[in-house]
């Protein structure tokens, strides 16, 4: 089953599933790619509101069409993609929420699906990575973000949107030979932030690197670093400049354009993408759906990559 036919039913009519795709229950409870929301933002350190991000992305995705010319693919014809609704996580207890998200991800991945997760704040990446690693072993990670998110704690809390990848390294669920941040920029607490990050195995591609070297060269560098390892891509929408993504909780000047992000992702089409997330969309700070539109197209490119790979594996 594919999306609703927009030549028969206007894009602004009907329920806002991602790209107007069928719900999971409408495809018999099984799908190749499950688009799932996690409306959780208890882990933020500055502006809240990412709990509403998933639905904002779904609304903006009404404009997506079934053929992706940039990848010469019709992702919803190549594989079954369905909207799996939201994972309801406790907004008052981060530890319990992390366990709930992990268990729900286990169920979806256990059914054979890959996950395209719509956040939510970046705290949710840790339980998602735990679940993916149960299936694939330690995974390669490309982390698109203005920030490192490898800090130790905030106010003594180990689970926040600034700590998920330190926890993931400590837990052994990442392949530390194939880790990279992309789009980082802005002030840090000290140089130790960078030295600690390097010790964990991360490489860094700053937003300035993308500007100076171009999307094609950066994508080639990342492909070489990842190789054929199982890959998880985690995208904080604040990797984009606030001009392209004002609707986020911790904006930083000097970021990538939406065009640069999409071109880098398209250059990763040959990588073994096992699941992905797009997080930190906070629609209360958005203007004219700029951020939500960028996030919906980002999720569309990631979904297309996964659908193509599923179709190729089936021959």
Image: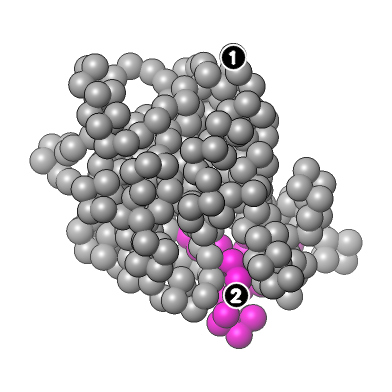
> Label 1: how many residues lie within 10 Å, few (<14), some (14-19) or many (20+)?
few
Q: Is residue 4 magenta?
A: no
Quadrant housing the C terminus: bottom right
Q: In the picture, residue 219 is in which quadrant?
A: top right
Picture layout, residue 238 above or below residue 107: above
- Tell me the tag on residue 31: 2
The residue identified by callout 1 is 212
Q: Which residues are magenta?
A: 13-37
Residue farthest along the left direction in this orientation: 156
Residue farthest along the bottom direction in this orientation: 28
Quadrant housing the N terminus: bottom right
Pinpoint residue 109: horizontal percent, then vertical percent.
46, 71
Residue 2 is left or right of residue 265, and the answer is right
Mark 1 vs mark 2, CA separation in Å: 40 Å
Q: In the picture, residue 7 is in which quadrant?
A: bottom right
Q: Residue at x 66, y 68 (%)?
A: 313
């Amino acid at each position: 089953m594919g999306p609703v036919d927009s030549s028969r039913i206007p894009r602004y009519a009907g329920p806002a599933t991602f790209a107007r795709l069928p719900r999971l229950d409408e495809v018999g409870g099984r799908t190749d790619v499950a688009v799932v929301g996690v409306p959780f933002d208890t882990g933020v350190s500055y502006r809240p509101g990412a709990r509403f991000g998933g639905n904002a992305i779904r609304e903006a995705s009404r404009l997506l069409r079934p053929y992706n010319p940039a990848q010469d693919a019709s992702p919803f014809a190549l594989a079954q993609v369905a909207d799996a609704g939201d994972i309801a996580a406790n907004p008052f207890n981060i530890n319990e929420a992390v366990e709930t998200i992990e268990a729900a991800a286990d169920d979806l991945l256990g059914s054979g699906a890959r996950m395209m997760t719509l956040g939510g704040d970046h705290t949710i990446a840790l339980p998602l990575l735990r679940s993916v690693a149960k299936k694939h072993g330690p995974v390669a990670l490309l982390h698109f973000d203005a920030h490192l998110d490898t800090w130790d704690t905030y106010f003594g809390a180990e689970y926040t949107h600034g700590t998920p990848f330190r926890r993931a390294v400590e837990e052994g669920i990442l392949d530390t030979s194939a880790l990279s941040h992309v789009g980082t920029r802005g002030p840090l607490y000290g140089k130790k932030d960078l030295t600690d990050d390097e010790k964990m195995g991360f490489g860094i591609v700053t937003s300035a690197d993308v500007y100076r070297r171009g999307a094609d060269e950066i994508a080639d560098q990342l492909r070489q670093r990842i190789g054929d390892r199982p890959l998880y891509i985690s995208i904080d929408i604040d990797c984009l400049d606030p001009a392209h993504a004002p609707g986020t909780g911790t904006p930083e000047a000097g970021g990538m354009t939406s065009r640069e992000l999409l071109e880098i992702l398209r250059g990763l089409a040959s990588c073994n993408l096992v699941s992905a997330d797009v997080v930190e969309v906070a629609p209360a700070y958005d203007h004219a759906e700029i951020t939500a539109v960028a996030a919906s197209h980002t999720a569309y490119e990631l979904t297309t990559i996964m659908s193509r790979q599923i179709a190729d594996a089936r021959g």
